[in-house]
Image (cartoon, coloured by chain):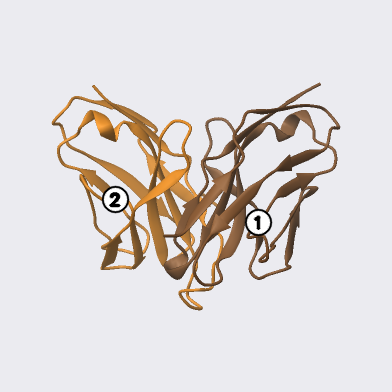
């Protein structure tokens, strides 16, 4: 069945460092891909999405490109801030928009 | 604009008790979902609904039931609580009126943290 694999955390960075969180997927068909972010004590919020191969999703300085040839959707940000500390989830969707999530990657950014 | 509202936020149950987790959305979304999130894990789909009167099982439906009598409400029922159901439960909704593969983003509630002792 469909699945999503994310790099394990926690990821600890200093402010202004470069961030990469790896995400690969296995799917039949052509799913849409998403990154969601979860701040402490809150629900998940959509960070960005891509609906077809070579699409780049971007939001708040974060970017991810839908790579069909490597079945990947890695999340990047050029300069992280303390306020980016959260748990990041990679997900794919198929029929009925059902989401399949990766395990999540906790990011901690220190001043 | 309230979005997706879940109640209660926290609850402790004894083994064998039953309870209903409430979820309501005010965005007129046709699709709704229930997920559970176990520590260090991603979310797993319990049940989903594509409209009032229509529900279907997700990946982990055992021990749960749902109903969808209105567009706004999608309650999740635990009949005989077991320790394995200790988790954080999230309700979500999305607007998929243009088709089942429209892949619109899901909007999540803040979750219900449930402990079963």
Tell me what residue is drawn at x 28 percent, y 61 percent.
B68
Tell me what residue is drawn at x 63 percent, y 68 percent.
A51
Q: Is residue A84 left or right of residue B31?
A: right
Would residue B101 be visible to someone looking at this image? yes
Q: Nearer the viewer, residue A33 or B52?
A: A33
Q: Please give the residue where the numbered disc 1 appears in the rendered image.
A: A72
Q: Nearer the viewer, residue B11 or B117?
A: B117
Q: Name the tint of chain A in the rendering.
A: brown
Q: Position of residue B76 (x, y in %)?
A: 28, 48
Quarter of the figure with the C terminus of chain B: top left
Chain under callout 2? B
Q: Position of residue A67 (x, y in %)?
A: 69, 62
Q: Please give the residue where the numbered disc 2 appears in the rendered image.
A: B75
Q: Is residue A32 left or right of residue A21?
A: left
Numbered label attached to residue A34 = none
Q: Nearer the viewer, residue B92 or A86?
A: A86
Separation of residues labelled 1 and 2 (CA atoms): 35 Å
Q: Residues within 10 Å of mark 1 (few under 14, many from 20)?
A: many
Residue farthest along the front direction in this orientation? A69
Chain under callout 1? A
Q: Name the tint of chain B in the rendering.
A: orange
| Closer to viewer: mark 1 or mark 2 | 1
Q: Residues within 10 Å of mark 2 (few under 14, many from 20)?
A: some
Would residue B3 be visible to someone looking at this image? no
Q: Position of residue B20 (x, y in %)?
A: 24, 42
Q: Position of residue B74 (x, y in %)?
A: 32, 55
Q: Which element carries disc 1, helix, strand or loop?
A: loop
Q: Is residue A85 above or below residue B101?
A: above
Tell me what residue is drawn at x 69 percent, y 62 percent.
A66
């Amino acid at each position: 069945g469909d699945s999503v694999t994310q790099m394990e955390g926690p990821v600890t960075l200093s402010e202004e460092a470069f961030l990469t969180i790896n995400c690969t997927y296995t799917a039949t068909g052509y799913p849409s891909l998403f990154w969601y972010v979860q701040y402490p004590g809150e629900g998940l919020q959509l960070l960005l999405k891509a609906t077809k191969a070579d699409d780049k999703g971007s939001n708040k300085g974060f970017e991810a490109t839908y790579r069909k040839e490597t079945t990947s959707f890695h999340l990047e940000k050029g300069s992280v801030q303390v306020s980016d500390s959260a748990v990041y989830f990679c997900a794919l969707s198929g029929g009925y928009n059902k989401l399949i999530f990766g395990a999540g990657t906790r990011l901690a950014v220190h001043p | 604009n309230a979005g997706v509202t879940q109640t209660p936020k926290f609850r402790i149950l004894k083994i064998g008790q039953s309870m209903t987790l409430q979820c309501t959305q005010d965005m007129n979304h046709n699709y709704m979902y229930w997920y559970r999130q176990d520590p260090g894990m991603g979310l797993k789909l319990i049940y989903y609904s594509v409209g009032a009167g229509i529900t279907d099982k997700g990946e982990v439906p055992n021990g749960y039931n749902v109903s969808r009598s209105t567009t706004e409400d999608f309650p999740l029922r635990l009949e005989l609580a077991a320790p394995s159901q200790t988790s954080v439960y999230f309700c979500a909704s999305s607007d998929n009126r243009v088709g089942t593969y429209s892949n619109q983003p899901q909007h999540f509630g803040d979750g219900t943290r449930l402990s079963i002792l």
